[in-house]
Amino acid sequence: MQCSVEDWTMAKWREINVDAELRRSVLVPSVTLVSGLQGRLTVADSVLLVWLEVQRTWAHLESIFIGSEDVSHHLPHDALRFQDIDTDFPVLP
């Protein structure tokens, strides 16, 4: 799963819009529904932020374990293990 900054930004805007709707007096009967949506968007926002951090960290690890022959030479077991995991990482659901 790829998550871009644009995806996170879109989710954040949706969260802000739901928050604005929650504050409108017209929606008083739907406060429970809107509050539930707001909670779900907050969770989605948190997940996207963590996923972006995972992607940044993974890219850094790729440059260390795959892009560096020195690391492959000094830590061959770890480099091979990382390469095995790296083939599975991009296809995570």
Image: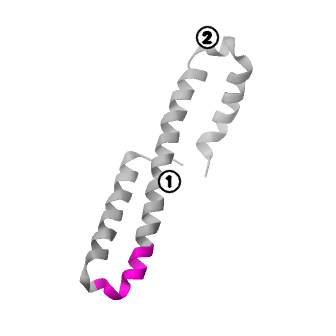
Which mark is in front, 1 or 2? 1
Residue at 61% across, 13% down: 69
- Does the rendering let one see residue 66? no
Q: Which residue is mark 2?
A: 70
Residue extending furthest bottom?
29
Query: Which colour scheme appears in the figure?
Result: one colour
The image quadrant of residue 32 is: bottom left
Q: Position of residue 73 (x, y in %)?
A: 67, 11
Is residue 16 a member of the stretch shown in magenta? no
| Residue type, mark 2 in image | Asp
Cα distance in 3D space between marks 1 and 2: 35 Å
Which residues lie in the magenta part? 27-36
The image quadrant of residue 42 is: bottom left
Question: Which mark is drawn over residue 47?
Answer: 1
SS class, disc 2: helix
Secondary structure character of the magenta stretch overall: helix
- On screen, residue 78 versus residue 59, left or right, reads right
Please tell me whether residue 18 is drawn above or below residue 84 in the rendered image: below
- On screen, residue 61 versus residue 36, left or right, reads right
Please tell me whether residue 5 is drawn above or below residue 43 in the rendered image: above
- Does the rendering let one see residue 77? yes
Please tell me whether residue 41 is drawn above or below residue 47 in the rendered image: below
- On screen, residue 76 versus residue 31, left or right, reads right
The image quadrant of residue 58 is: top right
- On screen, residue 88 versus residue 36, left or right, reads right
